[in-house]
Image (cartoon, helix red, strand yellow):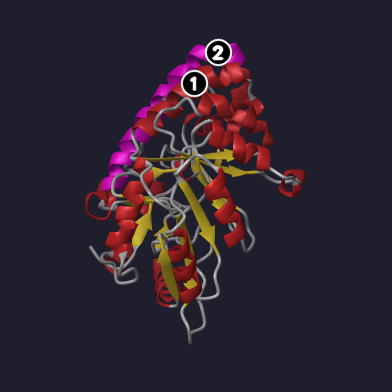
């Protein structure tokens, strides 16, 4: 299959499938470079389209595609996401947004008593209907040209935190754990139903799927996470989060975990017990962690047998490919032009071991 904005899409698909099997002979590399002779147009801002005014967003998406080249395993895509809590919106939560240029949004907690609430996918809800409308409008110009990424499915304890509020949920873990377990079962069932609905809406059977970081599979992919884990002990994480994360990864064909912040590192060993978790994406969060050297953590993830999504210059990519045991390494890189990117990829073809 070809895409208008990725003529070598079939080769990229093959490389990604080898990646998930651990059979690739070089690191996968995503390089998105401006086309020569044109002024590059950026992607629309995060949360664009949430107001239902799709036409200018789609016009800018097309301008972005037309003014960039997608080299290596970079695949042209645009993600539908109205807020970090988009998933909670599909469960019936109201989403509110900052009144500034960023427009970031969050869910308004509505659970007062777990006994009074049945958590479920709301296919007749406002945010699912808007998701469908945006996806259908995008597909009229995207099919055969570029991919559409689904919203990040922020489920398990993160979803409950959005619906209940983090402080109340922390108390619930201690005071009424059985009700939390029941709510988690409901969230995970909704996750599975929404996954099926998104697969149909975006035609994963034809195009495969891509997540917000540009990782692709011919099957299903997303980015499971549990940022709430920073606030709980390893024992609580194993009891409340790990079983549901395991189910989420079992429903995916490409498994990337978003590990966010120093407080989440204590759960790394437990996470790496999940057999379908393939790749860890580490971000240090806000604050002093951004200035720290996390080499030891990258090495630990590798020692635990998981791949990683990383950035870096050519020297770093060469070094980590030679150093790390994992073959599931994906690098997002910057190059001035297509020729430079392709020359480096060709060089890495010789780095076999």
Residue 77 or 192: which is nearer the viewer? 77
Residue 85 or 308: which is nearer the viewer? 308
Identify the secondary structure beneath mark 1.
Answer: helix
**Rendered residue at 44%/27% (across/down):** 274
Q: Is residue 282 left or right of residue 278?
A: right
- The residue at which mark 1 appears reads as 114
Q: Is residue 192 magenta?
A: yes
Residue 109 picture location, percent across and down: 55, 35
Give neighbour class at mark 2: few <14, some 14-19, many 20+ (Cα, 10 Å). few
* Res 263 → quadrant: top right
Q: Earlier in the sequence, mark 1 or mark 2?
A: 1
Q: Are marks 1 and 2 in contact (CB under 8 Å)?
A: yes
Query: Residue 322: in sight, yes or no?
Result: yes
Q: As displayed, is residue 205 above or below residue 232?
A: below
Q: CA distance from mark 1 to mark 2?
A: 10 Å
* Tag shown at residue 36: none
Residue range in magenta is 173-199
Identify the secondary structure beneath mark 2.
Answer: loop
Q: Quadrant of the N terminus?
A: bottom left
The residue furthest bottom is 37
Q: As displayed, is residue 40 above or below residue 316?
A: below
- The residue at which mark 2 appears reads as 176
**Rendered residue at 57%/49% (across/down):** 320
* Res 222 → quadrant: top left
Query: Residue 129: in sight, yes or no?
Result: no
**Rendered residue at 53%/30% (across/down):** 304
Residue 246 picture location, percent across and down: 42, 27
Residue 247 or 18: which is nearer the viewer? 18
Q: As displayed, is residue 30 above or below residue 64?
A: above
């Amino acid at each position: 299959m070809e895409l208008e904005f990725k003529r070598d899409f079939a080769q990229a698909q093959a490389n990604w499938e080898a990646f998930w099997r651990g059979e690739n002979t070089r690191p996968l590399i995503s390089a998105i470079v401006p086309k020569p002779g044109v002024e590059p147009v950026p992607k629309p801002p995060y949360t664009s389209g949430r107001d239902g005014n799709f036409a200018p967003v789609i016009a800018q998406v097309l301008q972005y595609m037309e003014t960039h080249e997608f080299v290596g395993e970079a695949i042209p895509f645009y993600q539908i996401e109205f807020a970090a809590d988009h998933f909670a919106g599909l469960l019936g939560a109201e989403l509110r947004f900052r009144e500034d240029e960023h427009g970031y949004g969050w869910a308004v907690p509505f659970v007062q008593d777990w006994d009074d609430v049945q958590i479920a996918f709301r296919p007749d809800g406002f945010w699912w209907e808007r998701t469908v409308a945006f996806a259908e409008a995008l597909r009229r110009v995207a099919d055969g040209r570029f991919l559409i990424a689904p919203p990040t499915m922020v489920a398990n304890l993160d979803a409950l935190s959005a619906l209940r509020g983090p402080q109340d949920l922390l108390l619930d873990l201690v005071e009424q754990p059985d009700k939390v377990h029941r709510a988690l079962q409901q969230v995970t069932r909704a996750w599975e139903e929404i996954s099926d609905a998104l697969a149909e809406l975006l035609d994963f059977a034809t195009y495969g799927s891509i997540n917000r970081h540009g990782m692709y599979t011919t099957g299903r992919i997303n980015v499971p996470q549990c940022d709430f884990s920073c606030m709980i002990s390893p024992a609580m994480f194993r009891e409340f989060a790990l079983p549901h994360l395991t189910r989420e990864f079992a429903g995916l064909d490409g498994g990337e975990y978003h590990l966010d912040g120093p407080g989440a590192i204590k759960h790394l060993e437990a996470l790496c017990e999940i057999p379908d978790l393939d790749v860890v994406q580490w971000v240090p969060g806000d604050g002093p962690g951004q200035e720290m050297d996390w080499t030891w953590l990258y090495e630990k993830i590798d020692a635990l047998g998981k791949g990683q999504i990383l950035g870096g210059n050519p020297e770093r990519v060469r070094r980590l490919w030679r150093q790390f045991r994992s073959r599931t390494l994906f690098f997002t890189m910057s190059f001035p032009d297509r020729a430079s990117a392709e020359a480096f990829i060709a060089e890495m073809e010789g780095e076999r071991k």
